[in-house]
Amino acid sequence: MSAVVVNNLSYCYQKGGKHILKDLNFTVEQGQIVAVLGLSGSGKSTLCLCLGGIIPHYFGGEMTGQVLINGQDTAKCKIARLALEVGIVFQDADTQLFSPIVEDEIAFAPENLCLPPEQIRYRVDAVIDMVGINHLRYENTNNLSGGQKHLVAMASVLTLDPSILVLDEVLAQLDAAVKENVIEILLELCRQGKTIIIVEHDLEAVTIADRVLLLEDGMLVNDGPASILQDKELLARHKLLI
């Protein structure tokens, strides 16, 4: 079974308004690292919301087509259930940090699942160790740098052990050392069988991808191997070369 199947997906935020996504069709297999590229306004972040079921559950507008996550139709599956399948780290980490203390933030999701305290502790310790933020465990989230906030957001998502991880324009915002650390984490997660979707506009941030999807004005204009990142003519045609 494929990790992600998108069939004829279109979406507009207001009925009768401009379509942000237009008839998208693609499949992502389990264990793949897939990069979704495109200029600002191409529909990348809206696609992330669709993959996590935030669209159509939390937004109005009009969605047609279908998104299947591990065989489950996002339109028919409760958002809490989908959170166990898809973890999203957003471009603005402040939008998903709720607790003032890092450790409490990371424990928040498994606590809401009413997991046994010993299992919560195990999960929190494991992801803090994986992400390398033990030194931040008792820090105030408001005092963290942007890169540190993204690491905490990633850790909080990973406590739910999702099989699919989506990064929405996160890597390009990190400094070189933190980016290298996150890339190593993503490669390790991939080795564990996780599916990774990296949504970006920065080509340098997606060199670990197996495959590249290119969005332009809400349409999927290219779906191919990562070697297309070396096709300067193609990238220039879609204004992705600086």
Image: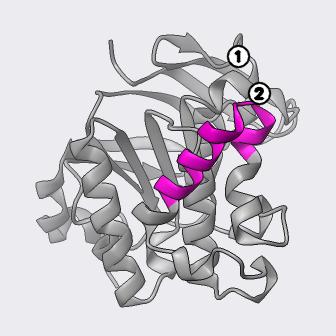
Q: Residue at x 20, y 43 (%)?
A: 224
Instruction: Please report the bounds of the magenta region as a residue range.
Output: 109-127
Q: Main secondary structure of the magenta part?
A: helix
Q: Is residue 28 left or right of residue 17?
A: left
Q: Amino acid at mark 1?
A: Ala
Mark 1 / mark 2, whichever is N-terminal: 2
Q: Quadrant of the N terminus?
A: top left
Determine which quarter of the picture holds residue 70.
top left
The structure residue drawn at horizontal position 44% and vertical position 89%, both measured from the top left corner, is 175
In the figure, 7 relative to 175: above or below? above
- Label 2: how many residues lie within 10 Å, few (<14), some (14-19) or many (20+)? many
According to the picture, the residue beneath numbered tag 1 turns out to be: 75
Q: Residues within 10 Å of mark 1 (few under 14, many from 20)?
A: some
Q: Position of residue 237 (x, y in %)?
A: 30, 65
Label 2: which secondary element = helix
Query: Which disc number belongs to residue 56?
Result: 2
Q: Position of residue 13 (x, y in %)?
A: 81, 40
Residue 241: x %, y % from top left: 31, 78
